[in-house]
Amino acid sequence: MQLDGIADIKTNFSNGCASIKDIAKQSERLGIDAVIFGDYARNSIEFGPKPFERIFKNKTEGPSVLGRGASGFISEIKDNDRQIKETILIPGVETSPFYYWSGSNYDGNLTAHNWDKHLLIVGLSTAPEYEQLPLQNSNFSLNYTDPLLQQFIIMGFLFMVSVAAVYKGYVRALTAPLMVLFLLMTFNNHPFQSSPFDAYHGDQGMKPYQNMIDYANSKGAMVFWNHMESNSGIRRHGTTKLKTLPYPEDLLKTKNYTGFQVIGDHQIQQIEAGQQWDQVLMEYLRGQRQKPVWGYGGNNHLCEDQNDNKLGSVRTVFLVREKKRGTLLDAMRKGRMYAVRQNAANRLSLDEFFIEDQKTGRQATLGQELTLTDFPTLKIKLRSIKGENNTAQIQIIRNGILAKQETVSLPYKLTWRDISNKQGERAYYRIKVSINSIEHLVSNPIFVKFSDSSNEVVPLPPFTQKPTPTPPIIKSAAPPNSMLVDPKKFLKVIVDGAALRKGPGTVFPQIAKLGEGVELEFIRRTNIEFNNKSWLVVKRGNRSAYIWEGVVKWVKTQPANMETK
């Protein structure tokens, strides 16, 4: 059966307007089968002058699960789950694992970076597990004492020496102030921090986020990247500037997370053919990742009708055998779900999507892998739940390539045998359906591999190769405004009107036309060729795209500012 779920729902435990009970009752009236809450775990930001940044600090804090009490949050969800019979209530929290400061109050440009870079955690079951989340400015913890202990011991030793000097009467006019100073510094550098990362040593790359992912995995929870393409830019939080740029490339820079938000309040480019989601899935097929990455739909609900946001406007539909909490969470963990954004009470429904081996009759659906003895046959049934005869565009994406695209009338049924698939190579298929910019659907992938004899549906294969490690972050002594580059990492356009595209081929939509001389940052080479030249993944500004190697050349000089080209 298919269960309608909504995820990332805020309540008055954090920035939402409604109570858990009100959300539960409204969801039951709307026929929603499951609610996964996403209240802020900790909603605080603080700044203090060094070397006493943890003692003399200005702190701005909003309501949050940890602020109001994790035990109360869990208890209230459980109590309402018992009372609401038709809707399953599941606790979850949205976390901001890290931010860092630049600028100064004196210059009026104090800025907190990456405050809006969020991870959704689903599946923590006890209050201590929430309380020990590796967040800045949170609860005391014993988890990170080792890396912080040395400085604490040094400050404590100096404090004890100064106490002895004062006690013996050595120049008390000097030693007494030193004693107070070392006491404050000892308290300021205590090792019982909630996170091993502070906000005063610049960007720490992916380490704080990987640390959060690893913590959630150690507790048996699931982790999803959220809002990765939100154009938040710079905004105000009280008297402080907050700056968070889109971060879709972080999908490639982290590992072992469960998935990410594929549908939200706006179009998400990561789901397009050949973009970051497909790049991650291809890494999995090549053995560079331990597990695939799934997509879910994030409702990101705060208040009804605020910024056109409605409860249930974005849904995650789970494929389960029975309506129980355990089976739903298992479907979420294993990718047996698709995401959809709807218009009012109507939405797209993916009634059927599976791959079949016609020789054996065996099938696999979302999140599964099928061992084939024949070309894969895809079977799809799609409709509007209100029965409207809409027109929709359907895309079938295989290994990051747009394998088939059609404009169809709903309801729609397709049986398609992919004879262009090179048997012998592992592959995956996923689909994307759009009626308009609001109503669209994204499925999770189905994996296939080929064999001469086996005809069984198998679980996703075990990891056989170590993941590619994240490159270490090398701090440079260069001034902040300088840019040191590898001269082999930049390209120059040599043909006026060269096209940047969404995928590696001319069948993909064009993003922009570039003039001769425009410089681009090189990301990687694909295995797609045309006239013996490869399609390349490049970056222009903050966006990745594709360009054919025949219209660019390598440059060996420091490039100009690419964002102004």
Image (cartoon, rainbow, N blue to C red):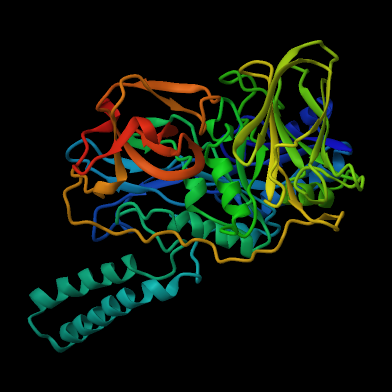
Q: Would residue 209 appear left or right of 204 to someone viewing this image?
A: right
Q: Would residue 183 appear left or right of 421 to someone viewing this image?
A: left
> If the image is split into quadrants, where does the C terminus sit?
top left
Q: Nearer the viewer, residue 368 or 81?
A: 368
Q: Would residue 377 appear left or right of 447 to someone viewing this image?
A: right
Q: Nearer the viewer, residue 269 or 225?
A: 269
Please state the total of marks drawn on the protein image: 0
Q: Is residue 375 above or below residue 311?
A: below
Q: Position of residue 315 (x, y in %)?
A: 72, 31
Q: Position of residue 542 (x, y in %)?
A: 38, 34
Q: Quadrant of residue 388?
A: top right
Q: Position of residue 16 (x, y in %)?
A: 60, 33
Residue 348 visible here? yes
Q: Is residue 176 above or below residue 87?
A: below
Query: Residue at horizontal 37%, vertical 71%?
Result: 148
Q: Position of residue 276 (x, y in %)?
A: 52, 41
Q: Which residue appears farthest toward the top when viewing the image?
A: 389
> If the image is split into quadrants, where does the N terminus sit?
top right
Query: Residue at horizontal 57%, vertical 31%?
Result: 272
Q: Is residue 390 above or below residue 37?
A: above
Query: Residue at horizontal 52%, vertical 30%?
Result: 505
Residue 237 visible here? no
Q: Nearer the viewer, residue 248 or 279?
A: 279
